[in-house]
Amino acid sequence: MSTLQAVQQALERVILDPNNANWLAIVKGARNGAVYGAKVRFPHALVMIFMFRSGTVQEKLSLIFKATRTHATNLAKYATIYKSMMLLLKTINGGKEQSFDTFLAGLTGGYLVFGRRSKRGHVSSVSKQIVIFVFARVVLSLAKLSIQPRAGIIKNPQLTKRISHDAWPVFAALSWASVMWLFRWYPETVQMGLRSSMDYIYVQSDHWDSLRTFIVHNK
């Protein structure tokens, strides 16, 4: 047996030992957070930066790497803090998970990873995007929960079904109406990435001075 095989078998014994499962789950959570963050951010940054950012290729590649690293690092840190807090709270409560453990663990991780500002007082655009992404889905989930007879304020199953059917068209229309109004009159309040996309579609489409700038490029 080679030294490499011996090391591999020793590591296998460690990671498959049930006694190590709790802290190894934290390590695996950090790994999965980093991998997922990189997979999600890299293609998004690649497209957005090369399409909408000015600068040299080297500068753009640097921005892509920085955004990917930030996204992957943030999710890895959050997973580590969240799972560590869950383990700590479970240990404190005698090995049993309480109903608010996830909320407290999420609160701690959310503040430490996404809520704190840099030394210059800034919050990274990547962190803002992640939080906004999560917030939007939380609102949708709470809206669904609010009309569930077993947990929400609507107890009539038929009324729940009717609201579920009709709510999306209203939600979609109001969302687009609101964002267009904000973009027109208070553009500085709109998130930078969304503002840039909307400017490209709705403002730059009003200007051209040749066939080339009408069809091929805006400028």
Image: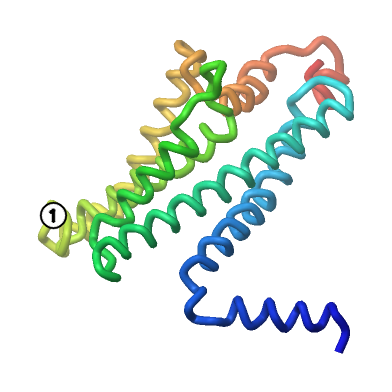
Camera-side residue of 169 and 118: 118
Camera-side residue of 182 and 60: 60
Residue 180 in picture, x, y percent from top left = 47, 23
Query: At 46% from the left edge and 29% from the top edge, which residue is drawn?
Result: 116
Amino acid type at image mark 1: Ile
Q: Residues within 10 Å of mark 1 (few under 14, many from 20)?
A: some
53 to the left or right of 122: right
Placement of the C terminus among the 4 image quadrants = top right
Residue 149 in picture, x, y percent from top left = 15, 62
- Residue under circle 1? 154
Q: Is residue 190 above or below residue 72?
A: above
**To which quarter of the image does residue 206 belong?**
top right
Q: Is residue 200 above or below residue 150?
A: above
Query: At 24% from the left edge and 64% from the top edge, which residue is drawn?
Result: 93
Q: Residue furthest bottom?
A: 1
Residue 158 in picture, x, y percent from top left = 16, 63
**To which quarter of the image does residue 8 belong?**
bottom right
Residue 74 in picture, x, y percent from top left = 57, 43
Query: At 49% from the left edge and 21% from the top edge, which residue is drawn?
Result: 190
Q: Secondary structure at mark 1?
A: loop
